[in-house]
Image (cartoon, rainbow, N blue to C red):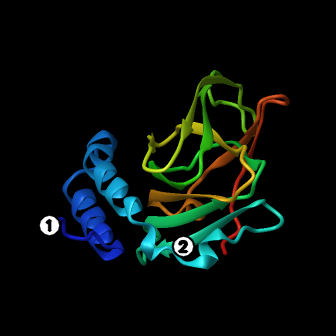
Amino acid sequence: MTTSYSFNDYISDLRGITAETTNESDIFDRLGPRAQRLVADTSWLKPEYYQTDPEQKFGVHVLHEESDHSLAVFIVSWDPHNGVGPHDHGTWALIAGIEGDEQNTSYARLDDRSRAGYAQIEIKSQTVAGPGDLVCMKNGGIHSVWNGSDQVTLSLHTYGMHVNYTERSIYDPETNSAEAFKVNLA
């Protein structure tokens, strides 16, 4: 018989793993299977997690955050035929698909980061992440997300730090601009 794996188990494992290592690859290798185990049983999801912010076209639902803003866990809900442009997180990110497919586009930064407000990026790869799939991004990674379906999609996002407390940017590849990026919380 398989024992259930609760959200509290996940937070306990998250704290334990990050207390033992700061190596992002090790965190992904150890935490990824636990995130997949958590999202495999969706009985813990609440109806409000499907709500999105009308202004930003996605919802950010904080499930956990340490008192120093580290180790933040969110459910992110994406409106149909919407997403967010290229951005970074200012920390490592481990994302596990819950419901629906989300297109993730990864970008390479080409400039030397010496000019404030300027960033030259190009597409590196594109993947579709569905239920149980993982997207792991080291600090400094840049990606965009798009929900091309007719339904709200959900994903579990685990970060080394709450993204509104990091220095992060959203990028415009057409104008080569980079601006500070904060999200509205549900």
Tell me the SS state at disc 2. strand
Q: Is residue 186 left or right of residue 64?
A: right
Reply above or below: 152 against 146.
below
The furthest residue to the left:
1
Q: Is residue 118 left or right of residue 65?
A: right
Residue 75 percent across, percent down from the top left: 54, 65
Residue drawn where x is 59% and y is 51% of the image: 100
Residue drawn where x is 77% and y is 50% of the image: 82
Quadrant including the C terminus:
bottom right
Disc 2/disc 1 C-alpha distance (Å): 32 Å
Which quarter of the figure has residue 87?
Answer: top right
Which disc number belongs to residue 62?
2
Q: Is residue 150 left or right of residue 1?
A: right
Tell me the SS state at disc 1. loop
- Given residues 15 and 168, the one toward you in this image is 15
Residue 20 percent across, percent down from the top left: 19, 56
Residue drawn where x is 59% and y is 53% of the image: 167
Mark 2, Cα crowd under 10 Å, few <14 / some 14-19 / many 20+, is some
Which disc number belongs to residue 77?
none
The disc, 2 or 1, on the residue closer to the chain's N-terminal end is 1
Residue 15 percent across, percent down from the top left: 28, 66
Amino acid of disc 1: Met
- Given residues 58 and 71, the one toward you in this image is 58
- Please tell me whether mark 2 or mark 1 is closer to you in this view: 1
Which quarter of the figure has residue 24?
Answer: top left
Reply above or below: 167 against 52.
above
Amino acid of disc 2: Val
Mark 1, Cα crowd under 10 Å, few <14 / some 14-19 / many 20+, is few
Which residue is identified by label 1? Answer: 1
